[in-house]
Image (cartoon, helix red, strand yellow):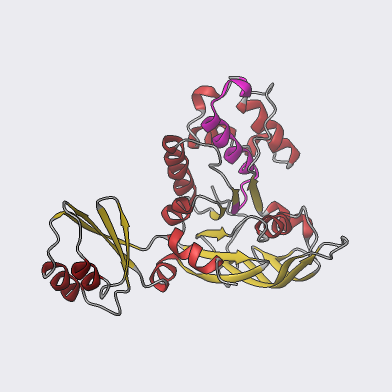
Amino acid sequence: MSSNYWEPPKNNLALEINNLSKIYNNEDNDIALDNICLTVKVGSIFGLLGPNGAGKSTLINIISGTVFKTSGNVLIWGIDIDKKRKQSKLAVGVVPQELNIDAFFTPNELLNLHSGMFNVPKIARKTDELLRLMDLSDKAQSYSRKLSGGMRRRLLVAKAMVHTPPILILDEPTAGVDVELRQKLWSHFKELNKLGVTIILTTHYLEEAENLCDHIAIINHGKIVANESKKSLLRKLNEKIIYIKFKNNIDKKSEQALKKIGTIKFDSNELQINFKPDKISMKKIIKIIYETDIDIIDLSTKDASLEDVFINITSKK
């Protein structure tokens, strides 16, 4: 969907943020963003994560041009938002969390209307292409109020893309959507990214970020507390989990032996052991388990998830 008009910046950065701060002038002079530095590469799917009140919405609103920053510098597709605010806003499409769709318009009418708001000439409009891309061609003439929740979400994505922006911001795009529809939306986001659209994703579904993103930043209390590739972030926790299902009770001697592996936790007839791979080898773990008297029904291992990393990082004071 990227237009030839939006040639990639020479440094290949879709977004550059340097020393960005936002202080709300209320009674407490709340610091929403505290000297943030961040870059997003062209063509990436970039995850922006953080607990409620961390500063995600403020950051997204500054990028999209609905909130003014207090200080710092922001370049969107190489465009300084202070020098060319209108042009920088055109480089971004935003899919909000709220379903802000007029119930009495059809998807076809809505996309054409929105295209007109962006001064897209009729001959250059991509209404049919967007509807086809979002699997909404058969609903083009149906009233929006008759669309399912998943269809409305896809229509919001199409609406954000009418002016062919090179950057798409997805703000909690699958909130309130069931598992099946969420999977479908993920495939649409991946397809857009393959077509050259740089995506910035905010989400509370950490499984979503783990599935979609190649790079992740975590913001907490207005500061960036992590900013690296997804693979690097997952390695950082250095933790794996062993699950053991057993028949009979585990005696004290076996329990003490298992503690040599890592932290243990019982749940009915299942045992969970959290261990650090760089501290103990799998060969030694198997030897310890083999030498116990545990009557094992099943045994499995699991790598640390993005959720584990997120909790570990944001729980630090």
Q: Nearer the viewer, residue 261 or 308?
A: 261
The picture places residue 55, in percent across and down from the top left corner, at 68, 60
What are the residue bounds of the magenta stretch?
A: 143-168
- Left or right: residue 110 versus residue 170 is right
Q: Nearer the viewer, residue 245 or 214?
A: 245
Magenta residue check for 13: no
- Left or right: residue 242 versus residue 70 is left
Answer with the quarter of the image where residue 112 lies: top right
The picture places residue 213, in percent across and down from the top left corner, at 47, 58
Q: Quadrant of the C terminus?
A: bottom right
Image vertical order of residue 293 relative to residue 151, above or below? below
The picture places residue 255, in percent across and down from the top left corner, at 23, 67
Image vertical order of residue 43 relative to residue 287, above or below? above
> What count of labels does the image hold?
0
Residue at the (57%, 63%) spot, across then down: 8
The picture places residue 188, in percent across and down from the top left corner, at 46, 42
Magenta residue check for 147: yes
Q: Nearer the viewer, residue 281 or 294?
A: 294
Image vertical order of residue 113 relative to residue 288, above or below? above
